[in-house]
Every structure is written in structure tokens, then in C-alpha cells.
Image: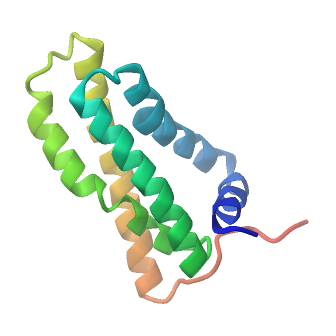
Amino acid sequence: MSAFFHFLYGAFSQPLWLQGWMLLLILMNFAAPMYFIRKFESKVVFVVFIINCVLMATLTAQFGYTRMLGIGHFLWFPMLWWINRRAKHFSMGQPFGLWLRALIVVNSISLLLDVIDVMRYILGDRAELIPPSS
């Protein structure tokens, strides 16, 4: 099974609430940037999303569907720093400004969870996160 399909299998094997969270991340980092694609900030978020997809497949090939996948979002740290500086130029009364701020909140929460997951992996929690088949 290719790493990408292994990643997808792992993602769709997760509890429904986690699948919903991943869907929110896709909406915020892929769908919304496509809607606002004329804005430079959207293009940056879109490119980082594509790079993250490649990183996730690479990490899955190397480590399996484990907590190490949290490393795949490391580019969000500089991206969010930059987006945070840019967001002040756009009103929250505009859909674009509202999306930028929502992106900061959602991706920051995800990064917090990612840091916890990677630390757990480093401390020895290296099991595959795919539940056994019934």
C-alpha cells in the first residue's frame, strides 16, 4: 500500500470527531484559500497545504500512521506568524479578514495537538493509530 493510501486509510479509520476536525483543517487550508485565491495570503496557505500533504505521505512512509505525523504541520509555525502580521490589514467585517483570523485559531489549536503528539512519540508512544479491523 502506498504511503498516501496508508495515510488516507489511517485518517478514515479515526473516530468521527477526529475526521470532522481533519475536514475542518482541509476546509480552512485548502477550500477557503481556493475561494480567496486572488489574495497572496491565500496562495501561501494553499502552497503550504500542498507541501504538508507531501510531508504527511513521506512521514507515513517512514513512521507509519503514528503520532510523528504532527511534524507534517511544522511549516504552520512560520506561516501563522506571517499570517498574524498580515491579518491586521484586513477587517473582520470582510470575509477574507474573518477567514484569516479563523485560520490562525484553528491551525494554532492543531499545532498544539501536534506538539503533544510528537512529544508523546519521542517519549515512546510509537504505536500505529489505525484501530484493528473488526
Side (left or right) of 67 relative to 134: left
71 to 107, vertically: above or below = below
Q: Quadrant of the N terminus?
A: bottom right
Of residues 111 and 31, the one drawn nearer to the viewer in this rendering: 31
Residue at the location (68% across, 62% down)?
10
Of residues 43 and 110, the one drawn nearer to the viewer in this rendering: 43
Question: Picture quarter containing residue 114?
Answer: bottom left
Of residues 42 and 131, the one drawn nearer to the viewer in this rendering: 42
25 to 60, vertically: above or below = above
Question: Picture quarter containing residue 102?
Answer: top left
Q: How many marks?
A: 0
Q: Position of residue 41 (x, y in %)?
A: 23, 32
Q: Residue furthest right?
A: 134
Q: Residue furthest bottom?
A: 124
Q: How is the image coloured?
A: rainbow
The answer, for residue 112, to whether it is visible in the render is: yes
Side (left or right) of 110 relative to 64: left
The answer, for residue 101, to whether it is visible in the render is: no
Residue at the location (40% across, 54% down)?
51
Residue at the location (41% across, 38% down)?
29
Residue at the location (58% across, 71% down)?
60
Q: Residue furthest top?
A: 93
Side (left or right) of 21 relative to 97: right
Q: Quadrant of the C terminus?
A: bottom right
Q: Position of residue 126 (x, y in %)?
A: 56, 83
65 to 107, vertically: above or below = below
120 to 78, vertically: above or below = below
Of residues 53 and 99, the one drawn nearer to the viewer in this rendering: 53
